[in-house]
Amino acid sequence: MTKDKTTDQKENRMETLGLSEEGLSRRNFLKGMAVGAAGIAVTSAIPGYTVFADVEAPLANGVSRAEFIGKVSNYFAWPHPTQYNDIWKAPLKQFKDVKTADRYGKQIETAYEESVTSGIGNGYFDPNAQLARQDAAVMMVKAFHLPLTTKTGFFKDEASISSYARASVNTLAALGYLTINSDQLFQPKRALTVDEMEVLFSKITGTMVAPVQALPKANSVAPRRYVKLYCPTPGAAIHYTTDGSEPTADSEVYTVETKGHIMEMIGTRGGGPDEPVPTDRVVTYKAVAFKDGMAASPVQTFVWNLHRPLMDDFQVLQMEKKTSVSPAIFRICNDSESVRPLAWYIEGPTSGIVFDALQTPADKKNLKTFVDGFATKPYILIIGHEHGDHDAQAMNFMNAGVDVYLSERGWASTSSTSGPFKPIFSTPESQAKVKNVDEGMKFDLGGGIVFEVVALPGHANGNVAIHDKKNGLLFASDFYGCTRAGSADNVGVAGMPPDLLLSFVQQSYSKYTKEGGKSDKLFTGHDESPLSDNNLKLYEAALQQVVDKGEGGCRPSLRGGTDAPGARTTMIGDMWKDGTNWCAIKLTGVMGDNAEFLSSTTDLKVRPYMADAANVGLNYNFGGHVKYSVLSNIEFAGGELVGKTVEYAAPGAPFTWAGKEIAVKNALQNRFNPWAYDYTVKVPKANTSITVIPTSMSTKAASITVDGKAVAYRSSNKIAVKDGQVITVKVVAPDKITTSTYTFKVAMV
């Protein structure tokens, strides 16, 4: 087939009109141009252009451009930028005629990001138009990173294949991925059919291993990246190098289970602005994948450009404006801090709170002076927990006369070197000025804005949150984790078994929501935007699945570099698909080891909360999760449980503080202890009934009864009460044998 003069004219005009190669054979947008003999004039969806359809004629079974790209994107599982939380990701690339919410919108935009398609020119994609066979060839060669052949002569109508597509068509033919019919005609401008698309995909994906993919995308600059490699071909083995050499079957093997997401950063996690490291670093990975009986994948090269300024200024962004009944909220950070923690300034009508104090050493920058630039009221500093990326600036506040609060359970680690972090309160004088902050304390910012402290040990002994139940604002530092996908972040809670932690989490949530309270916005130590109440539920669900399934509810950690390979983790959701709606919690030990990561009475010095004689011999590890016959929480509407002091861990070692040797118990006051069985419930004399809401530790408990009546998990049960009455709650474990009985004596007050 010979290309006619009109076709020549149309192709010569493409460059001047700013159209891409991809659209050459199918659409030509030639404003005012005469209709050629081979062209059919149709109405264009793009203003100002006449469309010439080079696809010979629409076919009933023709594949649209959107449908084809959708299949490509879905096969490679490319996440859309809106599906993951990465503050360093490149800006979203979009076409003018495609919306993200369209049926194939996300797939088209990810293929654009992957350079598989560049559209038809002038920023358009024309998603509903049928796809020419030659354009399908171009897209497949790009998607599978196939090296172009120089061979020709596969088809008699090769001359009619547009120049930009000819090598791609010949490449697929040379590799045997295109069917060459007896007439040896390719028909480059005929619409691709559904059957042809399926055959093409089947031949390629069934013959060669797909190219290795990498996340985060290597298209932006960031201070650190946690690299995940994956291959769409099931069962393929990934081999990679990081020194620029070509990978082979002898190169290091990558699996998510053994490597996690590999940490690449400038400096160290504990490093601040004074860390003596370069500000820039180039990270290069080369990867190939193999599978028996298939051709090896093409070698992929990924290059991440890292940048972290070693001495930057603090930054502030106002997140919420102040009203007469709600506080102003400011987010504070510093890009020179290695893990980019966040601090928050909360201001009401009469006073404010700085929550957390970042990682920059106090002798390098002054956060107190910076906050004074936008604070309009006197304020205090509350340190959410004692880790060095959240308390480094504390002395600048203290030296300026600002009251500094930190839970006494975290004092020990701030008086000396803790992990990678330097001591913060290193002198008796500074230690004497630190004020203890603990459960139940309230801070009134005026206008009815009151923040109540909730103790949340686990990630750190001194972890506390502050909660404004009226406005639904919860500031929790690192306790509820971080949803940054590019950081592969989990929150470590190895200091507490997940079953006891589940109980504490449920009790805290009950506090948040009691008497109409809300927890609509969650501000963490590493999420740039507030999370939602759903994240609190995900955190609970992640712990719950460990209780319900034991080791089967766990998986290896995704955080490579700092976590041990195979570190035991519980995870809900997918960081690359679920935006901020995912959660990962690191537990004790590594997968398959003999660590007792769930509660047991093996060593009551380690688990003092299980000291009740009724618990003798209990061990929920090694398949023992089927024996959970305890409650994790119980709520009383119309009454108040008199809790117990729950020692969740052995006391900390004695340490010197403010010139005296002290020891601090790892204990919470007035809490429900799942492994203590006799309680008192205070009920106002005016109440003749209360509502009992029992929550079994395992959602798979065989039965729950209240005063002998079977009730459902977390159900509300109204009970008439009088002074001295004893309410009995009985739980039978999933094994249908192990049983626990609780008594709650009513005291009318």
Image: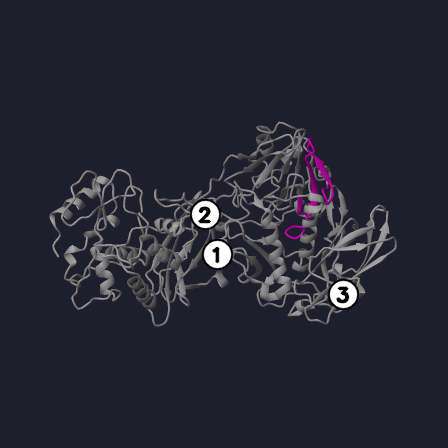
Query: Residue 214's x, y, as percent?
Result: 41, 55
In the image, residue 456 above or below residue 498: above
Q: Disc 1 and disc 2: Cα gap in Å?
A: 20 Å
Q: Is residue 642 visible?
A: no
Kind of residue indicated by mark 1? His
- Quarter in which the N terminus is drawn: bottom left
Kind of residue indicated by mark 3? Ser
Report crowding for label 2: few under 14, some 14 to 19, many 20 or more residues within 10 A (C-alpha).
some
**Residue plotted at (41% across, 57% down):** 77
| Chain-order first, disc 3 or disc 2 | 2
Give whichever of 273, 318 is nearer the camera.
Answer: 318
| Badge number at residue 82 | 2
Report crowding for label 1: few under 14, some 14 to 19, many 20 or more residues within 10 A (C-alpha).
many
Does residue 450 belong to the magenta stretch? yes
Question: Quadrant of the rendered structure where residue 389 is?
Answer: top right
Q: Disc 3 and disc 1: Cα gap in Å?
A: 42 Å
Residue span colored magenta: 436-465
